[in-house]
Image (cartoon, rainbow, N blue to C red):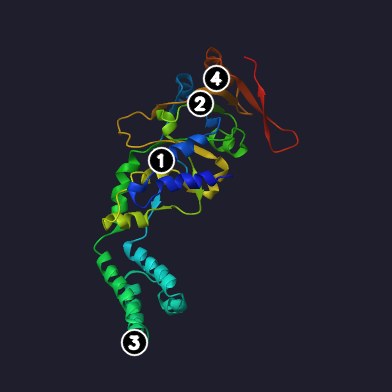
Amino acid sequence: MGEEWKGRLLACLACIDGQDVDEEKAFQIKYQHIPRRLYKYRTINDYSLDNLKNNIVWCSKVDSFNDPYDSSLTALSRENLLSNQFTESFQKSYPELQNILSPCLGLHGQDFSNELRSISSQFSEEFSQEISDFTNNTIDLLGNAENVSIEDFRQQFTGPIRDKLRVCPFSESFSSILMWSHYSDCHKGFVIEYDYHSLGIHEKESKALWPVYYSEKLFDISEHLNKVLLQQASPNKHLVLLAAIHKSLEWQYEKEWRLIYENVPESTSGNFIAAPVTRIYLGAKIAEADIQRILEIAIPKEIPIYKMELDKNNFAMTPNSVSL
């Protein structure tokens, strides 16, 4: 089945009309696919060791992440959206005439309206009144669209809400050479293994955990906002969540899941309760002094510890048990 389930999950949440969202079904689909273990790559410092000691995780503001697109949305202007919708509808309704629209392709807003008005005069002379009415209705809609800006609405909608978003990333893998390099101080840090699989479906931490959906394009809310502005649909309260779980295909190697907490007040700490810790993996280049700092925390908690060893023949690492 691969990643097909992620598409079904998105279909439950990414609805044009907010009333069509099936949150409970989305929870069920997600819960069935939570990995048995998730991993957090860490550098060694007082903060990461305190997190380990107190079984908490730090959820950051998305602006602090290394992905400039993190939790971003995109939206066409109403003019562009209507232009695209008209082109698609016309080609479906009159496939034999689609070449007539060639001069309009790539145009939007007033340029599209002007060209469409010119083409419409041909329709009224050469074709039926139905086609003329079809195009004239779009010209009227495009004129009215200038009164409302989807971009302004998008910025007002996502700005304050995005600022209150807190996210903590995890991976399905503890053995990624790249991730050890990027997030664990070039293999001098450590990885914490968490058991989110054992949590109940409606526990706070389980509800906040979501898989990342990798895509070529940003999450597009054009059609939804257009319908809301026209009062043809109810707002979808999951738009910011949906933006937070969409990432570029270039990040796919991270196999990411993330805790996502919305509407977190500015005064609230970024520390949140974590799932049970089941193992700790030490980096292949970790310093002896740092190993001792981790052992001081892990031994009283009876957490098994493994050290990553570089394979002598392959670009791979193997975890070996460390005696406590």
4 vs 2, front mark: 2
- Calculate the distance from the C-alpha at mark 1 to the C-alpha at mark 3: 56 Å
| Mark number, residue 125 | 3
* Quadrant of the drawing holding the C terminus: top right
User: Mark 4 packing: few (<14 Cα in 10 Å), some, or many (20+)?
Assistant: some
Q: From the top left corner, tell me how far across and down residue 186 is, in percent.
A: 58, 34
* Quadrant of the drawing holding the N terminus: top right
Q: Is residue 228 left or right of residue 86?
A: left
Secondary structure of residue under mark 1: helix
Secondary structure of residue under mark 3: helix
Q: From the top left corner, tell me how far across and down residue 81 is, in percent.
A: 36, 63
Q: From the top left corner, tell me how far across and down residue 42 is, in percent.
A: 52, 30
Dot 4 corresponds to which residue? 294
Looking at the picture, tell me which residue is in the foreground, 123 or 71: 123
Q: Is residue 187 left or right of residue 239?
A: right
Up-down relation of residue 64 to residue 54 (above or below): below
- C-beta proximity under 8 Å, tags 3 and 4: no
The three-letter code of the residue at mark 3 reads: Glu
| Mark number, residue 62 | 1
User: Mark 1 packing: few (<14 Cα in 10 Å), some, or many (20+)?
Assistant: many
